[in-house]
Amino acid sequence: MHSAIPSVGWDGDVARLVIAAVLGGAIGFERELREREAGLRTHMLVCVGSALFTLVSAYGFRDFLTSGDPVIRADPTRISAQIVTGIGFLGAGAIIRQGLSVRGLTTAATLWVAAAIGISAGAGYYSGAVITTLVTLFALWPLRIAGYKVFERLRPEEHGLVIELKSGQSLAPLLSTLEELGAEVETLELEEGIDRRIVELRLSAPSQRLITDISDLDYVVAVRWTR
């Protein structure tokens, strides 16, 4: 009876936790490069923590199961199932609404995926964990670049840009960034709001990537196209 109950030793624990750390760290590294709210350490910890919860849920109570008491029942998925809903609280903390825009949705999604990868690694489903990591990295990098090109073709007539800055923010850093991104400003209008400065620009050439890069600036509250 006891031999039928699965278990893992130190080598199995180390292998699963290390794999979880590496895969979670790969996603976190991409987020770190883009200076997102949750980076390398956060994604790695989420992935490793999920893997450990899965290991505890599946193998941590083996002594009770081998005690010979017939009334003891165990569900190896009970603890790990709570990760799916529990990770939502951490993901919600990464979502920030600023003015007209909402930031952090992708980071929240990557945290959720990192938890799923950790569960897979902890359960020994390595192929699923590796494949999901590769798909996630593809969605965060090559697919993002391809999306820029598609949107640039779909919006050739959009030259106007409205940028909301924090109150009292100087225009010099913004204009310097626009110049570095290769954007030529045709006209510029500034409007002072109660808690922010609104800048309306006319650009010589539209770019969907430009609006994304500007949205990433700390002093920018919101960005939107105008016709």
Image (cartoon, grey):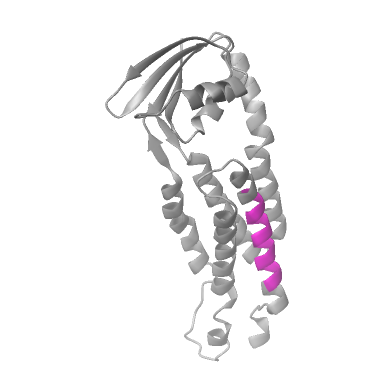
Majority secondary structure of the magenta segment? Answer: helix
**From what the image shows, is residue 175 above or below residue 13?**
above
Q: Is residue 98 above or below residue 126?
A: above
Q: Is residue 161 magenta?
A: no
Q: Quadrant of residue 76?
A: bottom right
Q: Position of residue 81 (x, y in %)?
A: 49, 62
Q: Nearer the viewer, residue 114 or 75?
A: 114
The residue segment tinted magenta is 14-27
Residue 168 in the figure: left or right of residue 142: left
User: Where residue 135 sits: x, y (%)?
Assistant: 67, 43
Q: Give residue 180's position: percent from left, percent from top.
A: 61, 23
- Left or right relative to 118: residue 22: right
Residue shown at 53% from the left, 43% from the top: 36
- Name the residue at 34% across, 27% down: 196
Compared with 189, 216 (above or below) is below
Locate residue 221: give its quadrant.
Answer: top left
In front here: 156 or 192? 192
Is residue 123 visible to the viewer in this orientation of the structure? Answer: no
